[in-house]
Image: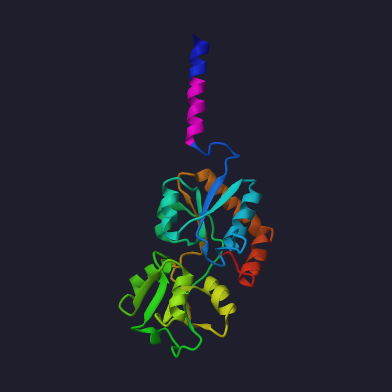
Amino acid sequence: MKTSSFKAMFAAVSFATIVSGHAYADDPVRIGTDASNPPFASVAADGKLQGFDIDLVDAICAAEKLTCEIQNMPWDGIFVALDSGKIDVVAAGLNITPERQQKYAMPGPYLNSPFVFLALASSTLDSTEALAGKNIGTVSASAMEKYLNAKMDSKFQISGYDSWDAAVLDLDAGRTDAVFGELAAMQVTYVNAKPDQYRFIGEPISDPTYSGAGKGLAVPKANEALSSKFDKGLATVIADGTHAQLTKKWFGVEMPAK
């Protein structure tokens, strides 16, 4: 009788372990990214994901001996996927903000990047003040859009887009006067790539409420073990010089984590 009870209990525990998901150390960690945000993440010509976030996550997972699978998904659905358990981590150039920290553990920071206004090199606009009343493009639901809505809604007309490329296409076409984005991405993807076509207007803007305390990953607060592994792995790749090498590779210069 005791043996039968033990077998039944063991079967129940085993079944619960199986259906609970991600119970074993060799289960893949599912990481979501938005591959429309170079140099953090984009799709290469061969269809593979590439970028700073991709390489950094690979390095962290290697340091912690984790099996990780990175999935490309639209920005506007990435936190829904995290909240519903479809993915375990978001690695998408996220700014560490008080709002996000209330809901998620955010391993990091792993990079710091202020906000900037990108304009055509041929534009006669020469300062942030000169943008008053102009149409400013940015990515919808991003920290940049939230900053504009909170701080400068009365100064600009704000147009939201689903990607930086879409916003810059409208800038090229003259449908917007500037694009409000992050220095790291704008510098590499547009100014460095086409210095005769784009330039920045005014000074970079750092507001911790919106630009945050640097870049971080997002992990559900309940998953303390996974968050701790990513914190530990990040510390390792910073200490061993991997982080510095990756910033040189993707941003052209060595950039600090904090």
Q: Classify residue 43 by image quadrant.
A: bottom right
**Residue at the limit of the structure toward the right, as seen here:** 240
Going by the image, does 20 lie left or right of 148?
A: right
Quadrant showing the C terminus: bottom right
Specify the principal SS of the magenta part. Answer: helix
Going by the image, does 85 lie left or right of 63?
A: left
**Residue at the limit of the structure toward the front, as seen here:** 46
The stretch in magenta equals 9-20
Depicted 156 relative to depicted 257: above or below: below
Count of marks overlaid on the render: 0
**Place of residue 66 in the rendered image (x, y in percent of width and height, measured from the top left):** 61, 46
Residue located 35% across and 75% down the image: 158
**Residue at the limit of the structure toward the bottom, as seen here:** 124
Going by the image, does 84 lie left or right of 62?
A: left
**Place of residue 110 in the rendered image (x, y in percent of width and height, measured from the top left):** 56, 61
Magenta span contains residue 13: yes
Asked whether 13 or 213 is in front, the reply is 13
**Place of residue 93 in the rendered image (x, y in percent of width and height, measured from the top left):** 51, 62
Residue located 61% across and 64% down the image: 45
Asked whether 45 or 94 is in front, the reply is 45
Residue located 34% across and 71% down the image: 149
Depicted 220 relative to depicted 158: above or below: above
**Place of residue 108 in the rendered image (x, y in percent of width and height, measured from the top left):** 54, 58
